[in-house]
Amino acid sequence: MENNNLKGFCEKWRCCHISGKGIFYSFLTLLIVALTVYISIQSINILDSGDNNNENTITISAEGKVDAVPDVARVNFSVMAQGKTPKEVQQQVSEKMNKIIDFIKNQEVDAKDIKTLNISVNPQYYYSYDYPRIPCPLMSEVYPPSSFPISCPPKSPVIIGYEANQTLDVKIRKLNDVGDIIDGAVENGATQVGGINFSIDDPDELKAQARELAFKKAREKADSLAKIAGMKIKKVVTFSESDGYFPLYYGIMDAKGMGGGMETGTETSVEPGSQEVTVTMNVTFEIK
């Protein structure tokens, strides 16, 4: 009898123990499901919020323009010489360029506004395909001079001379002097004048004015569109800008003759005109 009671108690306790485990696992499963549903709902809310933000913004592009007269000119002066030896052509170029630099400095151009851009010395070749358009060079006409007769046409290129070039970049701050400086440089040996451009030395203030105009136009346009839609501008969300300032470039002028110097007495006249400084603003507004 006692054994039967003990057996019944154990079986009842085991049943209760198993039922407790079942409740625990059931509760854990429900908790996981509840968390999954909560996270899903939050994700949907975030996506909806993002969609609403996109629906409640408007992006406007506007351009601001300011006209100004350039206050700086940049001009490139080049000297080129041809001769038999590298030393000969380099000496010719150096002598002419030194005269040009001295002249420019005498026109009250600061030394910091004068910069050498390029110096080169290159051999000049006679090729087999130059014959018979160009007569074959003699032994004394090649470099270095040959002690043996040269086949005509030559089997391989032969050096018949050298060419030297030097280019100077000059920033001229007195625009009324540009024409006189160009004429004087050519008279002192410049064989080419090029890279002429007029610019505004410090365009930041003008860009600030153009930026303000562009932003004002963007706001006015946004207000007008919002009014049509029955809404109002709440605030600026983000903005960006791009500027469109480009200096004016002129072409290249060749001096008359290899030694420079103008053939006529006509003075060079260069007009700077005016330039347009533009800034484009892209502004995103929040509307309600």
Image: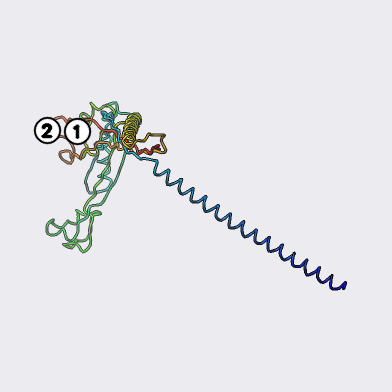
- In the picture, the disc for residue 264 is 2
Lower sequence index among marks 2 and 1: 1
Quarter where residue 230 is shown: top left
Does residue 47 appear to the left or right of 83 in the view shown?
A: right
Residue at image x 16%, y 62%? 153
Specify how the rendered protein is coloured.
Answer: rainbow
Residue at image x 30%, y 38%? 244
Q: Is residue 161 above or below residue 116?
A: below
Neighbours of disc 1 within 10 Å: few (<14), some (14-19), many (20+): many
Q: Nearer the viewer, residue 209 or 249?
A: 209
Quarter where residue 263 is shown: top left
- In the picture, the disc for residue 100 is none
**Which kind of residue does numbered mark 2 sit on?**
Thr
Q: Secondary structure at mark 1?
A: helix
Residue 93: x and y in percent read 25, 41
Residue at image x 20%, y 30%? 271
Q: Secondary structure at mark 2?
A: loop
Q: Residue furthest front?
A: 1
Q: Nearer the viewer, residue 80 or 23?
A: 23
Residue 191 showing in the rendered view: no
Q: Quadrant of the C terminus?
A: top left
- Choose mark 2 or mark 1, whichever is in front: 2
**Which kind of residue does numbered mark 1 sit on?**
Glu
Mark 1, residue position: 187
Q: Nearer the viewer, residue 188 or 281?
A: 281
